[in-house]
Amino acid sequence: MMPQHNDDTICAIVTAPGRSGVGIVRLSGHDALDIALQMLPLKPEPRHAHYCSFLNGEGQAIDQGIVLYFPTPNSYTGEEVVEFQGHGGLQVLNLLLERCRSLGARLALPGEFSERAFLNNKIDLVQAEAIADLIDSASQQAARSAMRTLQGEFSRRINDLVERITTIRINVEAAIDFSDEDIDVMEDTGVALELAAAQRDLDHIIAQARQGALLKDGMSIVIAGKPNAGKSSLLNALSGQDSAIVTDIPGTTRDLLQQEITLSGMPVHITDTAGLRHSDDLVEQEGVRRARLAMQTADQILLVVDAKTAARRMKAILEPLELNKLDDDQLEDVLKRTTVILNKIDLLEDSHAHSESTSYQGVDLTVIRLSVQENLGINLLKTHLQNCVGFKAANEGSFVARERHITALKSAEEYLKKAIKGVSESSQLELIAEDLRLAQRHLGEITGEMTSDDLLGKIFSSFCVGK
């Protein structure tokens, strides 16, 4: 077992601030029980709920409620833990907190309870991150997937793969030891077949991790186009509420307007922008500048065009994007992230909503004909947005993942493929063994078996104090 983080006893209010029926103050550390005994009229039994008064230094009641005691190592943090569950008034909780601090506890840092749980081997790093992801879940699917991660589903998949690679490494290194003998350890142990199986497992984990990352982070969309093309109306249609002011006056939207929705459980962050046009109005100019900045980082740009006035040539339709100011790489990047929305088809003879593909500058563009006013083609657009990022509705085996997990998985994949290539080309066994070791190391970074202190600080500092 790893040593405890330090010898400090920490305390914090672990419930959300504000008025509520119940509020909780938690103590964790070597002196947690000793501090609690100075605040209670009784000695709590382990894992029993006791109703009693919580006392100040003069023996007067601060509050009444339930006290719970969890001895080490059978607690959330793996340390001595005491919880005071009283009334949820902020002043009452602060009085309890100050009483704990006056008796020697210090205020917990953000995420320090979970960090201690990780350092004391109560949870791994993936499970620790899942706690924050569960709290921040933007949909029911995301919450269920975060719970599966917290229960160890993602960790189990990683650990099974690490165990498989460990077995392969043993056989490869045995082949090194018997290289002078008339024994073909690599062939006898089926290293090539085992590597192929490991690659299949890793591919499956990567695919699920990508879905998990989309469940957590979702995608960002910027709605852009000329004034009065129907951008704000499209935002309202996608969000299902009148978030943006809609008028016939050009330039109504002058700043970024943001809204969040979910599509089959995936969070979608939508930004409506000022109409892209040249203007002498300084406020509108700033709105256009912000619109173009938002477009640079969006996962998808919805370029809304009035179908009544749309030119047949794609070059004219794409004019608001100012592609002529971009180099070849930038142009390709923008086009790959752009979907052309031909709006107001209800005013045309052909009012059939549909999606089609066209090519511009060697890049395939999707063009969707719809009518926001008549709610034609909106579901078609929603499906297209999910397809753009490869999102599929969550299933019962999904788990939440983060970008760092995917980065580590891709690095592990790179070294695993090098090992497979090395075996097929009969490369030096020492090189194959090293590639397998590096693949295993990157997988270990995910669960925290091999993790830098800097990464730990970054992860746990994003938690709330109560966790």
Image (cartoon, grey):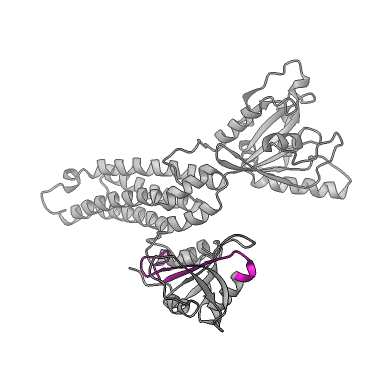
Magenta stretch in the rendered image:
66-92
Relative vertical location of residue 109 with respect to residue 189 in this rendering, above or below = below
- Residue 78 on the magenta segment: yes
Residue lying farthest to the bottom in this orientation: 58
In this rendering, position of residue 448 left or right of residue 256: left
Q: Is residue 400 visible?
A: no
- Residue in the foreground of this view, choosing between 231 and 430: 231
Q: Position of residue 422 (x, y in %)?
A: 30, 46
Q: Nearer the viewer, residue 390 or 442?
A: 390
Residue extending furthest right?
Answer: 280
Snapshot quadrant of residue 291: top right
Residue 151 appears left or right of 296: left
Residue 224 position in % (x across, y down): 73, 38
The spot of residue 341 in percent (x, y) is: 69, 30
Q: Is residue 119 left or right of residue 243?
A: left
- Which residue is located at x 36 percent, y 53 percent? 439
Return the residue found at the far left: 182
Q: Is residue 247 magenta?
A: no
- Looking at the image, is 159 positioned above or below residue 363? below
- Along the viewing direction, whichever of 70 and 412 lies nearer the viewer: 70
Asked if residue 442 is positioned above or below residue 212 in the image, the reply reads below
Identify the residue at horizontal 84%, vertical 46% (top origin). 284
Q: Residue at x 72, y 34 (%)?
A: 234
Please state which of residues 245 and 108 is positioned toward the viewer in this rendering: 108
Image coordinates of residue 301 in percent, x first then y, are 66, 39
